[in-house]
Amino acid sequence: TITLPDSIPNKKTLILDLDETLIHTDYLCKYSNCDMILDFVSNDKTIKIPVLFRPFLFEFLDFCSEFFEIIVFTASKKEYADCVLNFIEKEKKYFSLRLYRENCICLKNMIFLKDLRIFSNRKMKDLLIIDNSLYSFANQLYYGILITSFYSDLNDVELVNLKNYLMTLINSGSDDFREINSKMFNFEKIKMHL
């Protein structure tokens, strides 16, 4: 289990994926429009990674930090993820906690589940997770918001759409977003037909 910092009054906890949700790391150098080339060390080797930020990333994080406690929960390894997140946070503190691959449940060495029950001092109704993989939040579908995967599209507006949806949840006046999420996305019904 994970004990989070003390909860922030009147703020729910928003759990954000990293890769293909907030950024894309172009290991194969397929794209010419990277925003930053970062160095990270793995197994005593320095690796250069071109990183593309999803459009409106920082505006989205500014918005989220105003209305939510933000946690990053990635299936990536810590050394790589921290390299990217340290750059994103070089001027501002967005994330109250970072979780990595070792915090996931690994299935068949391929699928990484992010089980929200690991948070020992938060009510489940106060959690929301955003990820580009439905598998990631398969154990708690009512809590999830699925976002399309980002690679390099400069015209991508998913974070703007997501901000608008989150504002709809906030303005709903509901203390529990699960029912609204369930009606909006209907993931449980989809799961039944898989």
Image: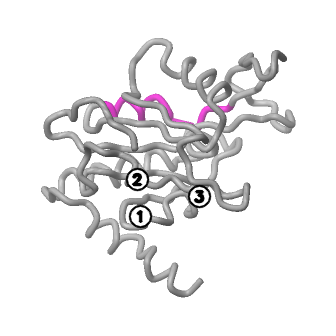
Q: Position of residue 194 (x, y in %)?
A: 59, 83
Q: Residue furthest front?
A: 1
Q: Is residue 160 magenta?
A: no
Q: Position of residue 79 (x, y in %)?
A: 66, 25
Earlier along the polypeptide chain: callout 3 or callout 1? 3
Q: Position of residue 188 (x, y in %)?
A: 43, 77
Q: Secondary structure at mark 3?
A: loop
Q: Amino acid at mark 3?
A: Ser
Disc assigned to residue 116: 2
Estimate the spatial distance between the alpha carbons at disc 3 and disc 1, rounded to whole Å: 13 Å
Closest to the observer, 93 or 114: 114
Residue 101 placement: quadrant: top right
Disc assigned to residue 192: none
In this figure, which residue is indicated by the disc labeled 3? 133
In this figure, which residue is indicated by the disc labeled 1? 140
Q: Is the Cβ of the residue at disc 2 closer than 8 Å to that at disc 1?
A: yes
Q: Which residues are magenta?
A: 52-65
Q: Quick one: quadrant of the N terminus? A: top left
Residue 84 placement: quadrant: top right
Coloured how?
Answer: one colour
The total of numbered circles placed on residues is 3
